[in-house]
Amino acid sequence: MRNKILYVYTENLNFFYRLNRELNQLNIKFKILSGLSKIPDISSLLLTTSKEFDRFKEHYKKLKILPYSKEKNFKHYILKVLAAYRTDYKGNYTDLLFSIDPGSRQVGLVVFVDDYYFNSHTFYDENVIIDFIKDYIDCFQTDNPDLLQLTFKFGSGVLTFTAKLIEQIINIFQKRNRLKIYLINESKSSKIKIQNIKKRFRTKHELSALIIALWSGVEVDSLDSLNSIKQGKILNLNNRKENEKLLKVVNESPIEVKDIIEKIINNDISLSQSAKMIMDY
């Protein structure tokens, strides 16, 4: 587990109520400090306000403090808290990966921050997906002096809708240097049956999006290559061997794919490590 001990100290009741509500919804346990209680000097996170920050900053070397001020976007603050808790505390993060499983009625999306599982979502309205992605990017890019690496992995199951999303991404970020878009052949993914894991996700599309993240697929680097996809010229995507490899691991390997996915969700291993474990089998 990369998750750390989380402390909350504040005399600001409004901040505490909002924070308490969000942390409970995320199922993140925390300890409330009353007064300036002594905190063990171990790797841990402290959530407080910027006005109360000075009470702690000089006393603990291993304690990571995430102060909040009312000028900040509270939703973005919670995302930064979640990133520090699930992955690692960093002043700035370097890359975001969005893995997307487009369905006919639902769309599953999994987000990775610096190669570690961050969150998963299900969308019932396709029109809000791009705004959701842009908000995540804005959260981690704001005040970051370095350009984030953005990676998108799309399942090819509903190609018309997928092509529409890819076109929007290309148009929005066409001048961005650090951008990679991949189309994943998920034609055999329906054969992958993973027992007792779906309860960790709201829908099967979230699990499918995580599986899509394990594959490399075909890079879509321009509107021209996207048009080739639309015209059916490269539908036979070249990650077929990866699909077959994953199916072999599922059916034959003593290493349970369910266990690998559990480790991904629990942040015990990174996405790159888990993909390598499967391909090295």
Image: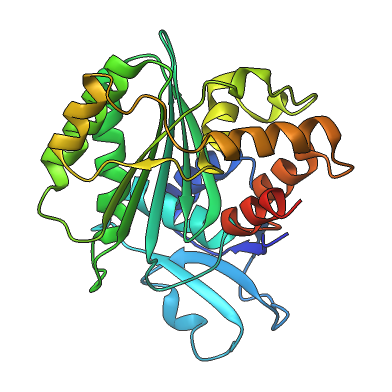
Q: Residue at x 35, y 50 (%)?
A: 151
The extreme top residue here reads 105
Question: Which one is nearer the viewer's eye here, 261 or 122?
Answer: 261
Percent from the top left, x then y, of residue 60? 59, 87
Q: Residue at x 60, y 24 (%)?
A: 189
Q: Residue at x 71, y 57 (%)?
A: 268
Question: Which one is nearer the viewer's eye here, 196 or 218?
Answer: 218
The extreme right residue here reads 254
Q: Quadrant of residue 126?
A: top left
Q: Is residue 237 visible?
A: yes
Q: Is residue 29 visible?
A: no
How many tags in the picture? 0
Indicate the colouring scheme.
rainbow
Q: Residue at x 36, y 24 (%)?
A: 235
Q: Quadrant of residue 237?
A: top left
Where the N terminus falls, by quadrant?
A: bottom right
- The answer to whether residue 192 is left or right of residue 123 is right
- The answer to whether residue 1 is left or right of residue 136 is right
Question: Which one is nearer the viewer's eye here, 106 or 153?
Answer: 153
Question: Which one is nearer the viewer's eye here, 69 or 102?
Answer: 102
Percent from the top left, x then y, of residue 129? 30, 28
Percent from the top left, x then y, of residue 99? 44, 38
Q: Please determine whether, in this image, residue 115 is positioned above or below residue 238.
A: below
